[in-house]
Protein backbone atom coordinates (compact mmCIF):
# COMPACT_ATOMS: atom_id res chain seq x y z
CA UNK A 1 0.00 0.00 0.00
CA UNK A 2 2.93 2.36 0.61
CA UNK A 3 3.75 2.23 -3.13
CA UNK A 4 0.24 3.34 -4.16
CA UNK A 5 1.19 7.04 -4.61
CA UNK A 6 4.13 6.09 -6.81
CA UNK A 7 1.96 3.75 -8.89
CA UNK A 8 -0.59 6.53 -9.37
CA UNK A 9 2.15 8.88 -10.54
CA UNK A 10 3.53 6.28 -12.95
CA UNK A 11 0.04 5.58 -14.29
CA UNK A 12 -0.14 9.24 -15.36
CA UNK A 13 2.94 8.69 -17.53
CA UNK A 14 1.70 5.38 -18.97
CA UNK A 15 -1.77 6.72 -19.77
CA UNK A 16 -0.36 9.10 -22.37
CA UNK A 17 0.09 6.24 -24.88
CA UNK A 18 -3.55 5.07 -24.99
CA UNK A 19 -4.73 8.68 -24.74
CA UNK A 20 -2.67 9.58 -27.81
CA UNK A 21 -3.83 6.45 -29.63
CA UNK A 22 -7.52 7.22 -29.12
CA UNK A 23 -6.96 10.89 -29.91
CA UNK A 24 -5.97 9.86 -33.43
CA UNK A 25 -9.00 7.70 -34.10
CA UNK A 26 -11.10 9.80 -36.43
CA UNK A 27 -14.38 8.96 -34.72
CA UNK A 28 -16.21 10.73 -31.92
CA UNK A 29 -15.92 7.66 -29.68
CA UNK A 30 -12.11 7.85 -29.99
CA UNK A 31 -12.15 11.48 -28.84
CA UNK A 32 -14.42 10.59 -25.93
CA UNK A 33 -12.14 7.76 -24.81
CA UNK A 34 -9.07 10.01 -25.14
CA UNK A 35 -10.79 12.71 -23.06
CA UNK A 36 -11.81 10.18 -20.41
CA UNK A 37 -8.28 8.71 -20.23
CA UNK A 38 -6.75 12.18 -19.96
CA UNK A 39 -9.21 13.07 -17.21
CA UNK A 40 -8.46 9.83 -15.34
CA UNK A 41 -4.74 10.53 -15.60
CA UNK A 42 -5.33 14.08 -14.37
CA UNK A 43 -7.26 12.86 -11.34
CA UNK A 44 -4.26 10.75 -10.29
CA UNK A 45 -2.37 14.02 -9.78
CA UNK A 46 -4.59 14.77 -6.79
CA UNK A 47 -4.70 11.27 -5.38
CA UNK A 48 -0.98 10.49 -5.54
CA UNK A 49 -0.27 13.44 -3.23
CA UNK A 50 -3.26 12.69 -1.03
CA UNK A 51 -2.24 9.07 -0.48
CA UNK A 52 1.44 9.93 -0.11
CA UNK A 53 0.56 12.16 2.83
CA UNK A 54 -2.16 9.89 4.26
CA UNK A 55 -0.03 6.74 4.09
CA UNK A 56 3.12 8.59 5.13
CA UNK A 57 4.64 7.40 1.86
CA UNK A 58 6.20 10.66 0.65
CA UNK A 59 9.42 9.78 -1.15
CA UNK A 60 12.11 11.70 -2.97
CA UNK A 61 11.35 9.68 -6.11
CA UNK A 62 7.68 10.60 -5.83
CA UNK A 63 8.52 14.28 -5.30
CA UNK A 64 10.64 14.17 -8.43
CA UNK A 65 8.30 12.11 -10.61
CA UNK A 66 5.05 13.92 -9.75
CA UNK A 67 5.83 17.16 -11.62
CA UNK A 68 7.61 15.20 -14.36
CA UNK A 69 4.51 13.05 -14.90
CA UNK A 70 2.37 16.19 -15.10
CA UNK A 71 4.67 17.74 -17.70
CA UNK A 72 4.85 14.58 -19.82
CA UNK A 73 1.07 14.18 -19.81
CA UNK A 74 0.19 17.81 -20.53
CA UNK A 75 3.04 18.56 -22.95
CA UNK A 76 2.56 15.31 -24.84
CA UNK A 77 -1.13 15.86 -25.45
CA UNK A 78 -0.62 19.56 -26.25
CA UNK A 79 1.97 18.63 -28.88
CA UNK A 80 -0.54 16.24 -30.45
CA UNK A 81 -3.21 18.95 -30.40
CA UNK A 82 -0.72 21.31 -32.07
CA UNK A 83 -0.03 18.72 -34.75
CA UNK A 84 -3.76 18.48 -35.38
CA UNK A 85 -3.93 22.27 -35.77
CA UNK A 86 -6.13 22.78 -32.72
CA UNK A 87 -3.82 25.05 -30.72
CA UNK A 88 -1.25 27.76 -31.25
CA UNK A 89 2.48 26.92 -31.04
CA UNK A 90 3.00 29.86 -28.67
CA UNK A 91 0.93 28.06 -26.05
CA UNK A 92 3.35 25.16 -26.01
CA UNK A 93 6.46 27.32 -26.25
CA UNK A 94 5.39 29.40 -23.23
CA UNK A 95 4.28 26.38 -21.16
CA UNK A 96 7.42 24.34 -21.84
CA UNK A 97 9.70 27.35 -21.28
CA UNK A 98 8.06 28.10 -17.95
CA UNK A 99 8.16 24.45 -16.89
CA UNK A 100 11.85 24.18 -17.78
CA UNK A 101 12.70 27.34 -15.82
CA UNK A 102 10.71 26.18 -12.79
CA UNK A 103 12.42 22.76 -12.94
CA UNK A 104 15.77 24.55 -12.94
CA UNK A 105 14.77 26.77 -10.04
CA UNK A 106 13.54 23.72 -8.10
CA UNK A 107 16.83 21.92 -8.76
CA UNK A 108 18.84 24.95 -7.65
CA UNK A 109 16.66 25.37 -4.57
CA UNK A 110 17.07 21.70 -3.70
CA UNK A 111 20.84 21.95 -4.09
CA UNK A 112 20.80 24.99 -1.78
CA UNK A 113 18.59 23.17 0.76
CA UNK A 114 15.66 25.50 0.07
CA UNK A 115 12.09 24.25 -0.08
CA UNK A 116 9.76 26.34 -2.23
CA UNK A 117 6.12 25.64 -1.56
CA UNK A 118 3.79 25.04 -4.49
CA UNK A 119 2.36 28.31 -5.72
CA UNK A 120 -1.40 28.90 -5.74
CA UNK A 121 -1.26 30.16 -9.32
CA UNK A 122 0.48 26.92 -10.31
CA UNK A 123 -2.27 24.82 -8.73
CA UNK A 124 -4.94 26.81 -10.55
CA UNK A 125 -2.94 26.51 -13.77
CA UNK A 126 -2.87 22.73 -13.46
CA UNK A 127 -6.58 22.54 -12.67
CA UNK A 128 -7.50 24.72 -15.63
CA UNK A 129 -5.26 22.67 -17.95
CA UNK A 130 -6.95 19.49 -16.77
CA UNK A 131 -10.33 20.99 -17.71
CA UNK A 132 -9.32 22.71 -20.95
CA UNK A 133 -7.42 19.84 -22.57
CA UNK A 134 -10.34 17.37 -22.59
CA UNK A 135 -12.51 20.14 -24.01
CA UNK A 136 -9.99 20.58 -26.83
CA UNK A 137 -9.80 16.83 -27.37
CA UNK A 138 -13.58 16.68 -27.80
CA UNK A 139 -13.33 19.42 -30.46
CA UNK A 140 -16.91 20.70 -30.72
CA UNK A 141 -18.63 17.33 -30.82
CA UNK A 142 -21.90 18.96 -29.83
CA UNK A 143 -23.21 21.70 -32.14
CA UNK A 144 -24.67 23.83 -29.31
CA UNK A 145 -21.69 23.79 -26.95
CA UNK A 146 -18.47 25.37 -28.27
CA UNK A 147 -16.08 23.36 -26.11
CA UNK A 148 -13.20 23.98 -28.56
CA UNK A 149 -13.43 27.76 -28.08
CA UNK A 150 -13.96 27.49 -24.34
CA UNK A 151 -11.10 25.00 -23.98
CA UNK A 152 -8.79 27.21 -26.06
CA UNK A 153 -9.62 30.27 -23.96
CA UNK A 154 -9.12 28.34 -20.74
CA UNK A 155 -5.81 27.02 -22.00
CA UNK A 156 -4.60 30.58 -22.63
CA UNK A 157 -5.74 31.46 -19.10
CA UNK A 158 -3.64 28.54 -17.83
CA UNK A 159 -0.65 29.95 -19.75
CA UNK A 160 -1.05 33.29 -17.97
CA UNK A 161 -1.30 31.52 -14.60
CA UNK A 162 1.68 29.38 -15.59
CA UNK A 163 3.80 32.45 -16.27
CA UNK A 164 2.62 34.05 -13.01
CA UNK A 165 3.48 30.96 -10.98
CA UNK A 166 6.86 30.68 -12.71
CA UNK A 167 7.59 34.27 -11.79
CA UNK A 168 6.49 33.54 -8.19
CA UNK A 169 8.82 30.51 -8.02
CA UNK A 170 11.75 32.61 -9.18
CA UNK A 171 10.93 35.38 -6.69
CA UNK A 172 10.60 32.88 -3.84
CA UNK A 173 13.94 31.32 -4.72
CA UNK A 174 15.77 34.62 -4.97
CA UNK A 175 14.18 35.86 -1.73
CA UNK A 176 15.32 32.66 0.01
CA UNK A 177 18.87 32.91 -1.29
CA UNK A 178 19.12 36.55 -0.18
CA UNK A 179 18.25 35.51 3.39
CA UNK A 180 21.28 33.20 3.61
Image (cartoon, rainbow, N blue to C red):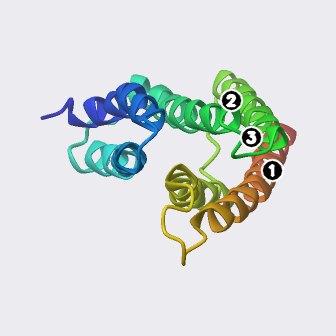
Give the quarter of the image for residue 102: top right
Residue 4 placement, left or right of 72: left
From the top left corner, tell me how far across and down residue 132 is, in percent. Answer: 58, 58
Depth check, mark 2 against mark 1: the one in front is 1
Q: Residue at x 78, y 41 (%)?
A: 173
The residue identified by callout 3 is 95
- For the residue carrying disc 2, how many other residues have a C-alpha within 10 Å: few (<14), some (14-19), or many (20+)? some
Q: Nearer the viewer, residue 31 or 152?
A: 31
Q: What is the number of callouts on the image?
A: 3
The residue identified by callout 1 is 163
Q: Nearer the viewer, residue 27 or 81?
A: 27
From the top left corner, tell me how far across and down residue 156 is, in percent. Answer: 76, 57
From the top left corner, tell me how far across and down residue 5 is, in percent. Answer: 28, 37
Tell whether label 1 touches label 2 (CB within 8 Å).
no
The residue identified by callout 2 is 103
Tell whether label 3 touches label 2 (CB within 8 Å).
no
Q: Nearer the viewer, residue 3 or 148?
A: 148
Q: Residue at x 43, y 47 (%)?
A: 31
Q: Quadrant of the N terminus?
A: top left
Residue 7 placement, left or right of 27: left
- Residue at mark 2 to residue at mark 3: CA–CA distance: 12 Å
Tell whether label 1 touches label 3 (CB within 8 Å).
no
- Residue at mark 2 to residue at mark 1: CA–CA distance: 13 Å
Q: Residue at x 56, y 55 (%)?
A: 139
Q: Earlier in the sequence, mark 2 or mark 1?
A: 2
Residue 28 placement, left or right of 7: right
Secondary structure under the numbered disc 1 in the rendered image: helix
Amino acid sequence: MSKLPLYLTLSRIFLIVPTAFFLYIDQSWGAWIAAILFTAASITDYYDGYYARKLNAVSNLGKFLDPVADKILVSGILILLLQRGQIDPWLIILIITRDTIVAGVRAAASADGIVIAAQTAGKWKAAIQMISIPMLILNDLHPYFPNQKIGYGLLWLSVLLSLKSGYDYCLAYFASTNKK
